[in-house]
Image (spheres, grey):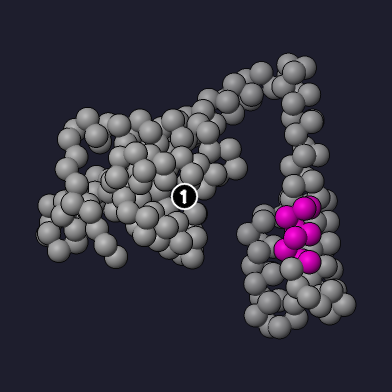
């Protein structure tokens, strides 16, 4: 993959951090929704990444297990490598790559995590307020509908609905167990994994 030879001053690292902090608060639906503005900033405006580095950062993170927000870390890694002269430049480039990872990930995570934590704390302290209760009651059907829609999309992705009845039955049983008991979700995931390994679903 082609790398760039760029020079980054301390102010540039702060600008990178500030950009990802601002994007963090706009990442409704996940960090991937802010990728177009990341592209504008990193590739078009600052020329800190190549098109190939930007695209491969997203592709690798989507293909790898774990949270897809890892593409932010890969972008920071590539910015740092470009500032250090590439992988072959030695430890200095590797340290700058790790700095890039830290700057972009902290920028992306700190604002949204802080806002979520503070909102959850405030909501818990004020759980008896009518507005908070109304908000929670109103959000419950929305969340349930989104989960049902996601489940529907996943199950209808199969082209054999007549033979998928065990999956539907397992989904229904799981929903009933979650609704009527306090069984931990990891237990249900384990049961599903065992049934899948045995070829029953």
Provide the major secondary structure of the magenta segment.
Answer: helix
- Horizontal and vertical percent position of residue 81: 22, 53
Residue designated by label 1: 69
Q: Residue at x 75, y 60 (%)?
A: 153
Q: Which residues are magenta?
A: 148-156
Residue 98 as seen in the image, left or right of residue 44: left
Q: Residue at x 42, y 45 (%)?
A: 39
Q: In which quadrant is the C terminus drawn?
A: bottom right
Q: Residue at x 29, y 45 (%)?
A: 47
- Horizontal and vertical percent position of residue 18: 35, 30
- Horizontal and vertical percent position of residue 7: 17, 43
> Which residue is more in the foreground, 71 or 183?
71
Q: Is 75 situated above or below 135? A: below
Direction right: furthest residue: 162
- Horizontal and vertical percent position of residue 1: 29, 65
Q: Residue at x 67, y 55 (%)?
A: 184
Residue 176 appears in the rendering? yes
């Amino acid at each position: 993959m082609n790398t760039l030879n760029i020079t980054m001053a301390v102010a540039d690292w702060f600008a990178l951090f500030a950009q990802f902090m601002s994007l963090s608060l706009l990442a409704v639906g996940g960090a991937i929704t802010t990728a177009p503005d990341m592209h504008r900033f990193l590739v078009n405006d600052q020329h800190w990444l190549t098109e190939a580095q930007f695209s491969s950062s997203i592709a690798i993170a989507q293909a790898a297990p774990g949270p897809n927000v890892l593409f932010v870390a890969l972008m920071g890694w590539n910015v740092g490598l470009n500032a250090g002269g590439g992988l072959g430049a030695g430890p200095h480039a590797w340290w700058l790559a790790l700095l890039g990872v830290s700057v972009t990930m902290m920028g992306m995570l700190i604002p949204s995590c802080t806002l979520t934590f503070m909102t959850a704390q405030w909501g818990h302290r004020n759980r008896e307020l009518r507005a908070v209760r109304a908000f929670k009651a109103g959000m419950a059907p929305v969340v349930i509908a989104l989960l049902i829609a996601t489940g529907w999309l996943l199950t209808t992705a199969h082209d054999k609905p007549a033979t998928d009845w065990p999956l539907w039955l397992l989904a229904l049983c799981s929903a009933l167990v979650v609704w009527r008991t306090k069984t931990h979700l990891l237990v249900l995931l384990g049961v599903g994994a065992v049934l899948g390994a045995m070829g029953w679903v």
